[in-house]
Amino acid sequence: MNKYKLKYKPLGSIAVLIEWPKEIKRDILENINLFKHKILADMGEYVLETVPAYNSLAVFFDTSKIKYSSVVTDLKEIYTSKDQKLLTAYKLWKIPVCYESEFGLDLDDLAKTKKITKDEIIKIHSSQVYDIYFIGFLPGFLYLGGLSKKLECKRKNRPRAKVNQGDVAIAGNQTGIYPRTSPGGWNIIGNSPLRFFDVDQSPPCFSVSGDKLKFVPVSKKDYDRIKKEVESGDYVIESEVYG
């Protein structure tokens, strides 16, 4: 597992920030998650929380149980130790999205900019399998990797004051779903009727870092049906186990 030269930095007196090379790539995501699972397996009684990002992992410790001065030493020993056989099962989530005009507010402009049709944008966007790197910005906002270079685009020059819950959007080399109504500057191409963060559910966000996601185009009729099932609590997100 010790394939990268990591940097260890203090976050106050109760956490360590571990940094990988500043790249967005699947190999780093897998290395972060493997390290996280090894930390939890070896030091779980001392760990309060782990927070992954594209190329970092913050590890918060209970300093009433372990001296901070020994934490980095222990972490380095875990990273350089021989790999343990850890069974980790992740999921591929299938997310319904309606790309019709009333939801795809920026599809026309994006098609003109990229010099391809709206149907081609939808086909490319929904044919990819995306990696879920981490969750942040807003509760339930999934940071996804794997967007086709054909769809990479700039953020909007003037952000919208209101982006609807469930809006699916693109900016730079990323795509994502707004989990709640908020301001936003990404290019909106569709909307999903699902809830991506629900305080009444346990856990409130159904996915975790390391999972995968695929967008599934649906008609407006199916979108309305799914939305009613979500609101009544009858909808089950389609998924399959991998890994």
Image (cartoon, helix red, strand yellow):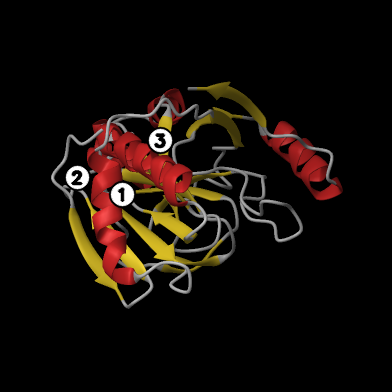
Q: Position of residue 243 (x, y in %)?
A: 48, 22
Judge the density around disc 2: few (<14), some (14-19), many (≥20) Cα neighbours within 10 Å: few
Q: Amino acid at mark 1?
A: Tyr
- CA–CA distance between discs 2 and 1? 7 Å
Residue linked to disc 3:
131
Q: Are marks 3 and 1 in contact (CB under 8 Å)?
A: no
> Residue 102 versus residue 207: which sits nearer the camera?
207
Coordinates of residue 45 in the picture (x, y in percent) = 52, 56
Which type of secondary structure does the marked residue at label 2 adopt? Answer: loop
**Left or right: 234, with 120 as reference point:** right
Q: Residue at x 58, y 23 (%)?
A: 241
Q: Amino acid at mark 2?
A: Glu
Check disc 1 and report its element: helix, strand or loop: loop
Q: How many marks?
A: 3
Whether residue 155 is visible here, answered yes or no, is yes
Give the residue at x 42% y 25%: 85
Check contact, mark 2 vs mark 1: CB within 8 A: yes
* Residue 23: numbered disc: 2
- Mark 1 sits on what residue? 54
Element type where label 3 sits in the image: strand
- Where does residue 134 sit, x and y in percent of width and height? 42, 49
